[in-house]
Image (cartoon, rainbow, N blue to C red):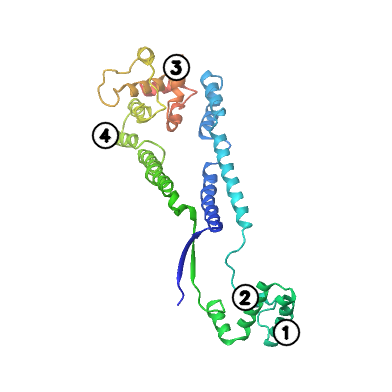
Amino acid sequence: MAGQQFQYDDSGNTFFYFLTSFVGLIVIPATYYLWPRDQNAEQLRLKSLRRVHGRCLWYRLRLMKSQQSIVPTLKKAALLFGWAVFLLLAYKVSKLDREYQEYNPYEVLHLEAGASVAEIKKQYRVLSLKHHPDKGGDEAMFMKLAKAYSALTNEEARDNWEKYGNPDGPRVTSFGIALPAWIVDQKNSMLVLLVYGLAFMVILPVVVGTWWYRSIRYSGDQILINTTQLFMHFMYKTPTMNMKRLVMVLTAAFEFDPRSNKEAIIRPTDNIEVPQLIRELGNINVKKKEPPFCYPYSLKARVLLLTHLARMDVSENIEEGKHSQTPLKCQHLILLDNSRPTTSLQAIY
């Protein structure tokens, strides 16, 4: 009965097949999802604002910042490097010699499959005379010819070849493991254990945990779950809210809160500029203590929205905050009725 034998890849050939497949499974999907588009979301947003804010200083600065971003270049460089490694490995694999070849005595004797016994004997005589060691031939080749001849003319050898693929009968079954032998070498055990622990006990949990934390915070529309719940609460509480109430609910979104959104910035100058704008706008009840409308971030967001609709002259800090800190999902409302700002304010008040 044939035995079984497991062995690591001493030559490295099997490992190259595994490595090529592994790199390909990473590079191909990554190229589809990460290759920079002609225009990213920020550039598309700025393009939609060009008609109204094309001459504003903040617009020119934001446009310049988006064009100078190095992230798309880094993505391209990383993907191109990955493809270079993948193609190099594929070329290496294509040049590897086949280690496991099916034994075929007809090929050894240079005969077509199904040749008659007479043809086999005739061809064997010709080749054996040519490769006989006593006549200066190759002894190894002569032994191969003798083995092939026996496999095709001896009944027992032929039966073994047809059943087991080998004239000598069943042989040890060898299973190759696509890992180089140095990985299991005792000298490298600590290094391999360190890399394994770092990859699966540190890097993998951190990556998965970060992705999971971000994914559970946002809905399918990339809106914070807390904001969605807040909107649903006030929609059920006040199904027929007026425009003034609607603006209050909108600007209470957690996207405006620096604790939930890093892009939302609270500046020291807000303590001076925001109260001044509240006095100029009027009709903003700062004494209303209903949360979250009384929170500083919500009050500031409401002031930014109303000053935008009123076309008020504001400082550069406020002008930049009206756009850079406003969630993308609110842009259509912020730009609502740009041609008739007075009517919009009348509707709110």
x and y percentages locating residue 204 in the rendered image: 40, 44
For marks 1 and 2, the one nearer the N-term is 2
- Residue name at image x 39 percent, y 43 percent: 208
Q: Can you identify the residue that label 2 sits on?
A: 104
Residue 291, relative to residue 133: is it above or below?
above
Residue 239, relative to residue 124: is it above or below?
above
Tell me the SS state at disc 2: loop
Return the residue nearer the eye: 270 or 196: 196
Q: Can you identify the residue that label 4 sits on?
A: 237
Q: Amino acid at mark 3?
A: Asn
Which disc number belongs to residue 317?
A: 3
x and y percentages locating residue 247 in the rendered image: 36, 26
Tell me the SS state at disc 3: helix
Disc 3 to disc 4, how far (Cα)? 35 Å
Whether residue 65 is visible: yes
x and y percentages locating residue 323 in the rendered image: 46, 24
Q: Amino acid at mark 1?
A: Lys
Q: Residues within 10 Å of mark 1 (few under 14, many from 20)?
A: few
For marks 1 and 4, the one nearer the N-term is 1
Residue depth check, mark 3 versus mark 4: number of the one nearer the observer: 3
Disc 3 to disc 1, how far (Cα)? 98 Å
Q: Amino acid at mark 4?
A: Lys
Tell me the SS state at disc 1: helix
For marks 2 and 4, the one nearer the N-term is 2
